[in-house]
Image (cartoon, rainbow, N blue to C red):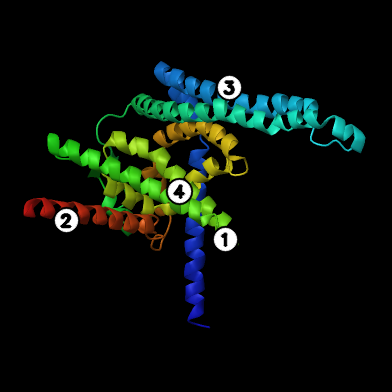
Amino acid sequence: MENIKPLIEITRTKLKQASLLWADGFREACCLHRVIVLCHRSRQLLIRTGQCFLLNGFIFLGSLFVLNSVVIPILQWILPDEFSQIGCEEMSEFHGVLKFYSLRGFLIQLFYVFWFYPLYVFSFILSNLWYNDIAKHGFAAMGRSGPSVVESSKQNDALTSHSKVHAARPAGLGGIMIGIGEQVYSVLLLNFFFLEVYATGFIPYVGKALNFLLLSWMYAYYCFEYKWNFSELGLDKRLDFFETNWAFFAGFGSPCVLAIFFFSPLVSYGVMAILFPLFVLTATGTDAEQVISTQRRRWSCAGLGKLPVFYVVDTLLMRVLSLFSLESQEQVQDNKTL
């Protein structure tokens, strides 16, 4: 029992630290007043944000509302499901009419195929282009230029590697190629991570909770990635900082997930397409390093430590890329032999 008590005390302390950092992240994500301040500073930012609201809120979600509240009820009234009030003799007389009534589901599917799915693709592509513009204008409105410095407390081992680190890259073509390579790897990493998030949803009992946690991390990373790109922070430093402060980012991503977790897929997309640029701007205005270091200065013991959030997908992605590398080497050798 004496050996267990210190372990219980350490666990309790770690849980308290994680809860405080999670709460800090959640609070920072909810500071949506920063969006108003940034939009007031930049007219271009206000226009782009308004366009996102118009496309995804008024047009996309508005179309869903019209379909569910107007079109489907009218079709149900004109082409009802049940004909219990019709007798057998009448049923035979109206056999041709019943075939016509069965077209209701087909008409609804046509509505999806020729309106919602094309609108979804159009909205997805255009919104992603606008998100980058929104992040760029928001970053400019913050008055930040050049590589940012990731500040940390020297007394804390978890943040020592980030203390006053400039994300410097080689100048010229080499730096451009490194930047492109990091962007490609980051996109692949997040796609693999999305597959992991999707797979956890099928795990019995704990699947929903794991899915919520991983989605929170994924959206938090998406929100901060724009700022890190404009700050020219290297991919290795991003991942290290993210995994070192996993509790803060889990808290930051939680409001994003709560907004969509209980809706249908199409409604969830529309809601998230509206809210995502707001959270991107909130992340742009968040000094995460300062918030985390302020919280950690209050701790007399060691920090939470690093949690390898991306370890599984990073390992899997490296193996997949190594397979492509081996295939390319074999092709080169075959060409040489020929």
Name of the residue lying farthest toward the bottom: 1
List x then y, in percent, for residue 195: 44, 50
Amino acid type for the residue under numbered disc 3: Phe
Tell me where residue 74 sits by quadrant: top right
Assess whether mark 4 and mark 1 are in contact (beta carbons under 8 angstroms).
Answer: no
Can I make out residue 89 in this image? yes
Mark closest to the chain's N terminus, 2 or 4: 4
In space, the residues marked 2 and 3 are separated at their CA atoms by 54 Å
Whichever of labels 3 and 1 marks the residue nearer the N terminus, that label is 3
Q: In the displayed structure, does residue 240 sit left or right of residue 119? A: left
Tag count: 4
Residue 200 point in image, percent of width and height: 51, 56
Which residue has dot 1 on it? 206
* Disc 2 residue type (three-letter): Glu
Which mark is on residue 177?
none
Q: Earlier in the sequence, mark 3 or mark 4?
A: 3
